[in-house]
Image (tube, grey):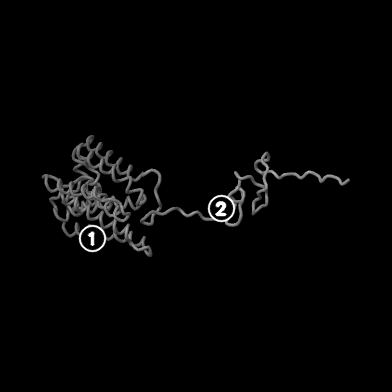
C-alpha cells in the first residue's frame, strides 16, 4: 500500500497573510491577493513594485488649452485683485486725498507720475461703482483664471487695465481724469469671449454683457468710454494670442503680444503728454 502524498501549502499574500492566493507579482515573484494586484505592461505587479517603478518616472503636470499649468484649486489671483480693490476703496474713504494722489491724471503723468496709469485702476468713485466692478470680477474672473492659469490671467488683467488708462490719456491729453477697474473688467469680458469661442462654448451671454455695458458706457455722462474700450481691445488681443498661438513658439507669442501692446500704449501716452 503506497503512502499518501504530503499536504501542499497554499501560498498567502505577503501583505495579507490570512488570504490564500496563487497570483504572483511579475517583478518580485511574491504572492499577492487581488486587492494588492496592480496591472502592469506585462502581467501584474504588487503595490510596492509599482511604487518603486514610479519613482523613476517624471510626472508631467497637466496643461490647459493655452499651454499653461491647469488650475483646479483656489483662484488666488482673482481674490487678490478683488481684495486690493476693496482695500484701496476703504483707503479712499479714510483719506479723501488718496484719490487725487493716485487717479489717472494727464498733467500728473506729464510730470513723471507714470504710476497713476496703474494705481488709478484700483480706485472707485462710489460704493455702487466698486460693487458693480467687483461683482463682474467675481463672476468671470475665477472661470477665466482656471482656463488660463494664474500668471497668464494676471497679465491679462493688468495689461487690460493699463491699456485702458493709456487710451484715456492718449485721447484726453493733460486734462484726463479717470479711475476705476472697468478697463480691466472689460478686458476680462473680451478674453472670455475669445476663450469660450476657442473651447466651442456658448458665447451669447458674454456678447450680450459686452454690448449692454458698451451702451451704458456711451449713454451716461461721466463714464470714461476710452478706458472701457482700451481695456476691451487689449483683452481681446491678449486672449487671441493665448488661445490661437501656434504650438511651436507659443510662449514667445503669448509674451510678445502683451509686451507690444504696453509699448504701443506707453508710447502713445508719452507722445500725447
The structure residue drawn at horizontal position 38% and vertical position 65%, both measured from the top left corner, is: 248
Locate residue 246, reporting x and y percent.
Answer: 35, 63
Residue 174: tell me if it is visible: yes
The structure residue drawn at horizontal position 23% and vertical position 34%, both measured from the top left corner, is: 94
Secondary structure state at the residue bearing disc 1: helix
In which quarter of the view is residue 271 placed? bottom left
> Dot 1 surroundings within 10 Å: few (below 14), some, or many (20 or more)?
few
Along the viewing direction, whichever of 2 and 120 lies nearer the viewer? 2
Residue 115: tell me if it is visible: no
Which image quarter is the N terminus in? top right
The residue tagged 2 is 54
Q: Say left or right for 192 vs 76.
A: left
How many marks overall?
A: 2
In the rendered view, tell whether residue 154 sits above or below residue 16: below
Disc 1/disc 2 C-alpha distance (Å): 49 Å
Between disc 1 and disc 2, the foreground one is 2
Of the residues under marks 1 and 2, which one precedes in the sequence? 2
Q: Say left or right for 221 vs 243.
A: left
Res 264 label: 1
Amino acid at each position: 500500500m503506497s503512502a499518501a502524498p504530503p499536504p501542499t501549502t497554499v501560498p498567502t499574500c505577503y501583505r495579507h497573510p490570512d488570504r490564500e492566493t496563487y497570483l504572483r507579482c511579475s517583478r518580485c515573484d511574491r504572492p499577492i491577493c487581488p486587492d494588492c494586484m496592480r496591472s502592469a505592461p506585462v502581467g501584474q505587479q504588487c503595490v510596492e513594485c509599482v511604487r518603486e517603478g514610479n519613482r523613476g518616472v517624471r510626472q508631467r503636470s497637466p496643461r490647459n488649452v493655452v499651454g499653461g499649468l491647469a488650475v483646479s484649486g483656489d483662484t488666488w489671483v482673482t481674490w487678490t485683485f478683488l481684495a486690493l480693490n476693496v482695500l484701496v476703496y476703504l483707503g479712499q474713504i479714510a483719506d479723501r486725498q488718496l484719490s487725487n494722489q493716485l487717479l489717472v491724471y494727464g498733467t500728473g503723468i506729464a510730470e513723471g507720475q507714470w504710476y497713476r496709469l496703474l494705481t488709478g485702476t484700483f480706485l472707485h468713485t462710489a460704493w455702487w461703482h466698486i460693487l458693480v466692478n467687483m461683482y463682474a470680477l467675481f463672476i468671470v474672473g475665477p472661470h477665466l483664471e482656471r482656463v488660463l492659469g494664474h500668471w497668464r490671467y494676471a497679465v491679462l488683467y493688468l495689461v487690460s487695465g493699463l491699456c485702458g488708462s493709456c487710451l484715456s490719456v492718449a485721447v484726453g491729453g493733460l486734462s484726463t481724469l479717470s479711475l476705476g477697474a472697468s478697463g480691466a473688467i472689460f478686458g476680462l469680458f473680451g478674453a472670455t469671449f475669445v476663450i469660450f469661442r476657442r473651447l466651442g462654448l456658448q458665447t451669447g451671454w458674454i456678447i450680450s454683457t459686452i454690448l449692454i455695458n458698451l451702451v451704458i458706457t456711451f449713454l451716461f455722462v461721466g463714464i470714461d468710454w476710452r478706458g472701457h474700450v482700451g481695456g476691451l481691445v487689449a483683452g481681446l488681443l491678449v486672449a487671441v494670442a493665448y488661445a490661437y498661438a501656434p504650438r511651436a513658439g507659443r510662449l514667445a507669442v503669448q509674451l510678445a503680444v502683451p509686451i507690444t501692446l504696453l509699448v504701443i500704449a506707453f508710447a502713445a501716452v508719452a507722445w500725447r503728454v
